[in-house]
Image (tube, grey):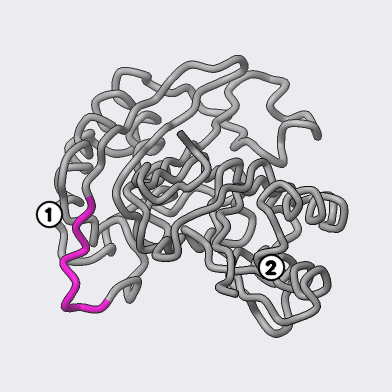
Amino acid sequence: MEARTVQLVLHYDGGHFAGWQRQRTERTVQGVLEETLGRLCATPTSVTGAGRTDAGVHARGQAAGVRVDPKWTPHALRRALNATLPSDVWVAAAHEMRPEYHARYSALSRRYTYVVGTDEEAASPFRRPHELVERHPLDRSLLDAAARTIVGEHCFRGFAVQGTAPESNDHRCIVRDARWRDRPGGLAFEIEANRFLHHMVRFLVGTMLEIARGRRPVGAMSALLGAPDNREVSPPAPAHALFLDRVEYPAALYLDVA
C-alpha cells in the first residue's frame, strides 16, 4: 500500500537543540524526531521541515512532513509521538496531506516573532530564556518606521549570512507583513514572508534595535536593502528570543480539512 503523507505541526524549545537540521554529533530537532519515528515505525523514517531553525530558535508552528505506513492515522501518530518524544518537543497537530505535499517547497509563507523584554522582570529566569532583555530606551516611532521599510519585495542580501544562497540567486523575498506590537512587559516584532534567508530575521531585528537606540539612522534600513553584501548590517539579535509561529500551505493539499 502507498505510504500515508502526514504534516506534523511542532512546538519545541530550541534551548537544548543545535538547530533543526540533523547532525552526526549534536542533538537536533530533526534528529530527535527521526529517532523517535524510527522506533515507532520499526523502520528508518525521514522528516522534512518547512524551515531550518538555528540553534536556540524556538517554534510553536514548525511544519514537518513525514511518510508512514497507512496504518498510522494522523491522530494515532500524534498521540504516539507525544507519548514518546522528549519534553521539549510536542506535536500540536497532525494532518493527512496529498502525496505531492512537501513541507519546504509547498509552503506559501512563514511567520516569525521576535520577543523583546523592556521591563525589569524581563531579567527573570522564567522570561530571560525566551526574550531579549533590552536595557536601553527604544524609540518606538523609529521601530515602526524601520519595519515599514521592509514590507514588499526586496533583495535581502544585506540582511543575510554570506553564502546563504548561491550567488546566482537574487536573494529576493516578498515580505507580506512586518510590524512591532506592544505586549505585556515589552515588544514583539512579527514578520511574514514567502521565504527567509539565513539569519535574516535576526539581522533585521538587530539593525532595527540599533536604530531605535539612536545609534544608526533610520535610513540604514533602505541602504541595506540595496546593499551588495552584509558588511554594513548590525550584529544579529540573539537566537533565543526568536519563534517560528506558522507555516501556510495551499488548502488543496490538506485531505482532512473541509
Point 37% across, 19% down: residue: 140
Q: Residue 102 location in percent, x, y?
A: 43, 64
Q: Kindly tell me whether residue 16 is visible in this rendering.
A: yes
Amino acid of disc 2? Thr
Question: Which span of residues is magenta-colored?
Answer: 166-173
Looking at the picture, does residue 59 appear above or below residue 24?
above
Q: Residues within 10 Å of mark 2 (few under 14, many from 20)?
A: many
The stretch drawn in magenta includes residue 172: yes
Q: Tell me the SS state at disc 1.
A: loop
Residue at 34% across, 46% down: 250
Residue bearing mark 1: 226
Position of 215 relative to 163 (above/below): above
Q: Position of residue 28 (x, y in %)?
A: 69, 68
Q: In the image, is 102 to the left or to the right of 167?
A: right
Please name whichever residue, 134 or 199, is drawn nearer the observer in this view of the structure.
Answer: 199
Q: Quadrant of residue 6?
A: bottom right
Q: How dense is the environment of label 1, judged by Cα within 10 Å: few (below 14), some, or many (20 and up)?
A: few
Instruction: Please identify the dominant SS of the magenta region.
Output: loop
As drawn, the residue found furthest toward the front would be 1
Task: Specify the label residue 28 is tagged with.
Answer: 2
Magenta stretch contains residue 130:
no
Q: Quadrant of residue 162?
A: bottom left
Mark 2: which secondary structure? loop
Q: In which quadrant will I find the C terminus?
A: top left
Q: What separation in Å lies between label 1 and label 2 (alpha carbons)?
A: 35 Å
Give the image location of residue 32, x and y in percent.
74, 67
Between disc 1 and disc 2, the foreground one is 2
Residue displayed at 54% across by 62% down: 5
